[in-house]
């Protein structure tokens, strides 16, 4: 997962740490990774089923009532789509360096000479995926194949293929795999922009190693932000479902009553029941097209960490930092950190600034800033209205490509 660690001083010429400690109980959003930090263990990316996990892991849609006339509509969907859902087994080799302490003569006396080569161990995990065309291109989650040395794809009919990762995007958790095969069964992709809560949905995947498992339920909600579910390093507005999602479902399809893919199953709320989340298929499709053509995805990056300004927070800030800051705005987005040398820093943004509008559009929540930034092209100028110590300023910032670190 992508985390940007920064060490920065605010424009008050005071360490940022006191402000961060002051805001310790408040959710913060980072536009370095453009994500929200929420209380620990809130959301859990669906792990591959694993002995040692590979990673930490334009149609109108039919409402459920319209499907009740056919009590076997789930059977029909499974028969239609099941052959295009695959199991993905991935493995990677992890090298462990010998601790320096073992070079000490005292340790050698008791444990002998340390190994001359780094120790290696193999991590294995499994997830799900679905074939998007007959030529063998498969969508799955990035965390299923992240850093994998070997990827094996197993079809429902039992055939196995070695998969090649064409590209992966940890920021949206989308990856594309290619297998050397033709005339394969494939899925139809719906338009996830038109979804309505209450629609019937079906999930197919390989939870806990149980291949070709089918669960069903309804679409519980749309537009769940990364901050809503605690996916702190993602840029996705998720679909929520009560269809059972478990480890190993990662990368599998979430389907509507006609058997069209509306999302890619990816996450659950740890310790909760009936709270599963999927990446909207329009997002997965957009990202996959870039992965197929370019092998990577470039996301706009500002380099800020932020939180929503509320009247309560304003009062606390003026009370605690009244000798260094004067907050007069009643709402907006408070910058808590600015990454050194980032586009935000180069534009003159500072910790403690309050963004009140972007391109003349008022912003009050970090998610609103995130959506605006994600929707523009890299290098496009954003006009920010910023309050600083009671004074209003206009600043221009040009997002750069997000520096993404692969998880190894």
Image: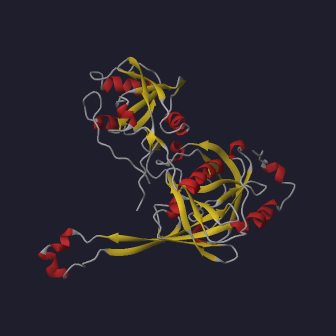
Placement of 335 over or under 124, stated as above or below: above
Q: Looking at the image, which residue sits at the far right?
A: 69
Q: Looking at the image, which residue sits at the far front?
A: 293
**Is residue 278 something one can see in this rendering?**
no
Placement of 349 over or under 262, stated as above or below: above
In percent of the image, x 47 and y 67: which residue is there?
148
Q: Is residue 290 left or right of residue 148?
A: right
Coordinates of residue 336 in the picture (x, y in percent): 37, 34
Placement of 62 over or under 150, stated as above or below: above
Coordinates of residue 96 in the picture (x, y in percent): 32, 70
Q: Is residue 203 left or right of residue 47?
A: right
In percent of the image, x 46 and y 26: which residue is there?
384
Placement of 22 over or under 259, stated as above or below: above
For the C terminus, which image quadrant? bottom left
| Number of numbered labels in the structure image | 0
Coordinates of residue 315 in the picture (x, y in percent): 39, 23
For the N terminus, which image quadrant? bottom left
Residue 120 occupies quadrant? bottom left
**Is residue 139 something one can see in this rendering?**
yes
Q: Looking at the picture, tell me which residue is in the foreground, 223 or 286.
A: 286
Residue 252 occupies quadrant? bottom right
Q: Looking at the image, which residue sits at the far left?
A: 105
Residue 265 occupies quadrant? bottom right
Q: Looking at the picture, tell me which residue is in the foreground, 107 or 21.
A: 107
The figure's colour scheme reads secondary structure
């Amino acid at each position: 997962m992508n985390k940007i660690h920064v060490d920065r001083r605010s424009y008050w010429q005071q360490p940022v740490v006191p402000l961060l400690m002051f805001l310790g109980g408040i959710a913060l959003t980072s536009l370095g990774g453009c994500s929200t930090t929420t209380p620990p263990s809130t959301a859990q990316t669906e792990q591959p089923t694993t002995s040692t996990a590979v990673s930490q892991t334009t149609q109108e849609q039919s409402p459920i009532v319209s499907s009740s006339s056919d009590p076997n509509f789930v059977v029909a969907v499974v028969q239609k789509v099941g052959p295009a859902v695959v199991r993905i087994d991935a493995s990677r080799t992890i090298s462990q360096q010998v601790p320096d302490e073992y070079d000490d003569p005292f340790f050698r006396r008791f444990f002998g000479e340390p190994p001359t080569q780094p120790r290696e161990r193999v991590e294995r995990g499994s997830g799900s995926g679905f074939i998007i065309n007959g030529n063998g291109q498969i969508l799955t989650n990035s965390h299923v194949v992240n850093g994998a040395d070997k990827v094996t794809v197993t079809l429902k009919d039992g055939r196995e293929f070695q998969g090649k990762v064409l590209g992966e995007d940890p920021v949206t958790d989308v990856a594309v795999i290619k297998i050397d095969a033709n005339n394969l069964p494939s899925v139809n992709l719906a338009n996830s922009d038109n979804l309505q809560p209450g629609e019937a949905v079906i999930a197919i995947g390989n939870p806990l190693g149980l291949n070709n498992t089918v669960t069903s339920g309804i679409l519980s909600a749309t537009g769940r932000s990364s901050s809503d579910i605690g996916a702190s390093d993602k840029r996705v507005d998720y679909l929520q479902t009560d269809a059972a999602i478990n480890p190993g479902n990662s990368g599998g399809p979430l389907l509507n009553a006609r058997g069209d893919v509306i999302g890619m199953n990816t996450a659950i709320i740890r310790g909760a029941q009936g709270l599963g989340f999927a990446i909207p298929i329009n997002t997965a499709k957009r990202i996959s097209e870039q992965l197929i053509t370019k092998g990577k995805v470039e996301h706009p990056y500002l380099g800020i960490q932020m939180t929503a300004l509320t009247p309560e927070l304003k009062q606390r800030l003026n009370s605690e930092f009244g000798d260094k800051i004067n907050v007069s705005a009643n709402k907006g987005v408070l910058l808590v950190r600015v990454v050194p040398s980032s586009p935000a820093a180069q534009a003159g943004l500072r910790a403690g600034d309050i963004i009140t509008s972007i391109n003349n559009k008022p912003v009050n929540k970090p998610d609103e800033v995130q959506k605006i930034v994600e929707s523009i092209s890299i290098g496009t100028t954003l006009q920010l209205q910023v309050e600083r110590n009671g004074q209003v300023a206009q600043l221009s910032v040009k997002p750069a490509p997000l520096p993404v670190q692969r998880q190894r």
